[in-house]
């Protein structure tokens, strides 16, 4: 490639025709260093601002503020360089506006997600660090950007959900409030004394370290099922203790029901043989749900 052609282009940019090559090289280096120092300065400002506002606002607001400072620095660097070179920025901005319109028509989905991202940031249905559920996807929020929300699932996968999808779906913020309720649907045989069952469950809750005493647990009758009596048992807990509570309480219920001879219905088949005729009676079970 002809180096003279490249040199002429650089000379035209820096308006130094027939200049000494060393002087031209000096202008090029100064040009690069100017951009570098502006970007570094704004990165330092990001760090300082991040430390100053840490703990005063949410992680998501801190994240967006640092990004705003970064992009502002980049724009200022470009405008400063244009001004230094004597380039008319009004023509460039006008061309950018026309290009932006054309790009908008070509990327309607992205624009829809962008607008949805503005609504999400203003509405604040979730924040960085929250556990959320969107459709059948659950995970912890890593970032909320103008185009998408990024999650880390509980099995350590990375998922990107477009903001447009979130705005059109039911979003559940699992960790929004400090306490949650665990709903247990239990089933016991018809022969059991429900008052005894209630006392056993309440005693287990009083001994469980993860159950809150206030709000108080709730024991209720649900319905008469095919194979037994369906019961509702609700307990409250701090949001970080979900799995500890669920595992320990269910294990304790099974163990205590066995010790108290409280029957939990299960699928069984009764076969009656009379005069060579076989009869089958099938009894189902109301499955426990949590």
Image: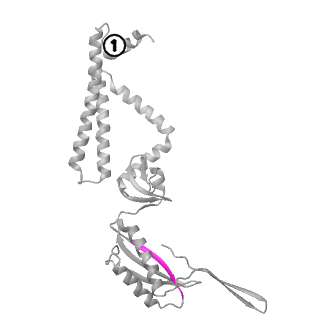
Callout 1: 10 Å neighbours few (<14), some, many (20+)?
Answer: some
Q: Count the marks.
A: 1
Q: Main secondary structure of the magenta part?
A: strand
Is any atom of residue 216 visible in this view?
A: no
Residue at the spot of label 1: 11
Hey, which quadrant is residue 228 in on the image? bottom right
Q: Is residue 139 left or right of residue 58?
A: right
| Residue for point 25% across, 46% down | 50
| Residue for point 24% across, 38% down | 44
Is any atom of residue 255 visible in this view?
A: yes
**Which percent across, then down, holds residue 115?**
42, 47
For the record, the magenta segment spans 181-189
Q: Is residue 154 left or right of residue 278?
A: left
Q: Nearer the viewer, residue 275 or 143?
A: 275
**Which percent across, then down, holds residue 168?**
48, 56
Residue that lies at the very extreme toward the top in this rendered image:
18
């Amino acid at each position: 490639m002809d180096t003279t052609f490249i040199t002429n282009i650089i000379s035209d940019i820096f308006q130094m025709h027939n200049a000494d090559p060393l002087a031209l090289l000096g202008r090029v280096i100064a040009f690069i260093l100017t951009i570098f120092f502006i970007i570094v300065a704004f990165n330092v400002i990001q760090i300082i601002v991040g430390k100053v506002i840490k703990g005063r606002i949410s992680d998501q607001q801190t994240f967006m503020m640092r990004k705003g400072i970064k992009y502002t620095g980049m724009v200022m660097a470009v405008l400063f360089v244009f001004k230094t070179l004597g380039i008319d920025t009004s023509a460039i901005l006008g061309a950018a506006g026309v290009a932006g319109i054309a790009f908008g028509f070509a990327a309607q989905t992205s624009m829809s997600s962008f607008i949805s991202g503005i609504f999400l940031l203003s509405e604040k249905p979730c924040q960085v660090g929250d556990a959320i559920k969107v459709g059948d996807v659950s995970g912890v929020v890593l970032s909320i950007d103008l185009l998408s929300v990024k999650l880390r699932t509980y099995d350590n996968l990375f998922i990107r959900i477009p903001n447009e999808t979130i705005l059109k779906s039911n979003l559940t913020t699992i960790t929004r409030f400090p306490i949650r309720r665990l709903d247990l649907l239990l089933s016991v045989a018809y022969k059991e004394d429900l008052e005894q069952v209630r006392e056993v469950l309440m005693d287990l809750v009083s001994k469980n370290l993860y159950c809150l005493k206030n709000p108080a647990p709730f024991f209720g009758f649900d319905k008469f099922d095919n194979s037994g009596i369906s019961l509702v048992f609700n307990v409250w807990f701090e949001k970080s203790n979900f799995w500890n509570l669920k595992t320990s309480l269910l294990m304790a219920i099974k163990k205590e029901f066995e010790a108290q001879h409280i029957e939990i219905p299960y699928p069984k088949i009764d076969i009656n043989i009379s005069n060579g005729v076989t009869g089958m009676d099938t009894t189902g079970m109301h499955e426990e749900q949590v």
